[in-house]
Amino acid sequence: MNTTGKVRKMDNGRIVWRKATDLDQNRIRFNWGYHDGALDIRTGFVRRDDLDKHYDTVYVVGYRAGAEDMRNATYFEDSTKAWEASGIESGVTAYRYAK
């Protein structure tokens, strides 16, 4: 899955592509990471990149939360609880899932 951007087709047929970092909404980037992390655990995919050097910390926090939930069998395709526990929304800088 391409985690650096999303493609969306508009009603007028125009295709729009936005980088993840262009979005002001941390919740969306967290959600992408959350589901990617869960999917990687479910499929046994091993990441070759270093998450500590990833350009989007919010995505990484979501990724680690999704992976942890999948390993703990608490993943139910909804990132709301993990989002609330992460502390990102409240501006906490020491995110729960940060390494």
Image (spheres, rainbow, N blue to C red):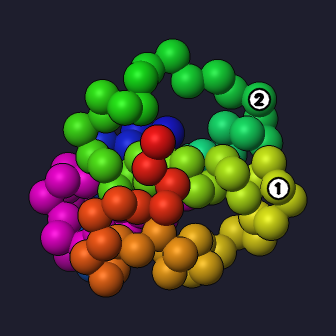
Q: Nearer the viewer, mark 1 or mark 2?
A: 1
Q: Is residue 85 left or right of residue 70?
A: left
Measured from the top left, where is residue 12 in percent x and y? 21, 75
From this viewpoint, which residue is outermost toward the right? 73
Q: Which residues are magenta?
A: 12-35
Observer able to see residue 84: yes
Q: Earlier in the sequence, mark 1 or mark 2?
A: 2
The tag on residue 72 is 1
* Label 2: element kind: loop
Q: Is residue 17 visible?
A: no
Q: Amino acid at mark 2?
A: Gly
Which residue is at a point 51% across and 16% down the rendered structure image? Answer: 48
Return the residue at label 2. Answer: 44
User: Which residue is rendered at x = 65% and y = 75% of the image?
Assistant: 78
Residue 42 position within the rendered picture, expressed as x and y whole percent measured from the top left: 78, 42
Residue at 31% of width from left, 49% of height from top?
57
For the view shown, which residue lies furthest in the front direction?
Answer: 94
10 Å crowding of disc 2: few (<14), some (14-19), many (20+): few
Q: Is residue 98 above or below residue 53?
A: below
Which residue occupies the foreground of this view, 53 or 17? Answer: 53
Q: In terms of image quadrants, where is residue 45?
A: top right
The stretch drawn in magenta includes residue 21: yes
Which amino acid type is marked by label 1? Asn
Element assignment for label 1: loop
Q: CA distance from mark 1 to mark 2?
A: 15 Å
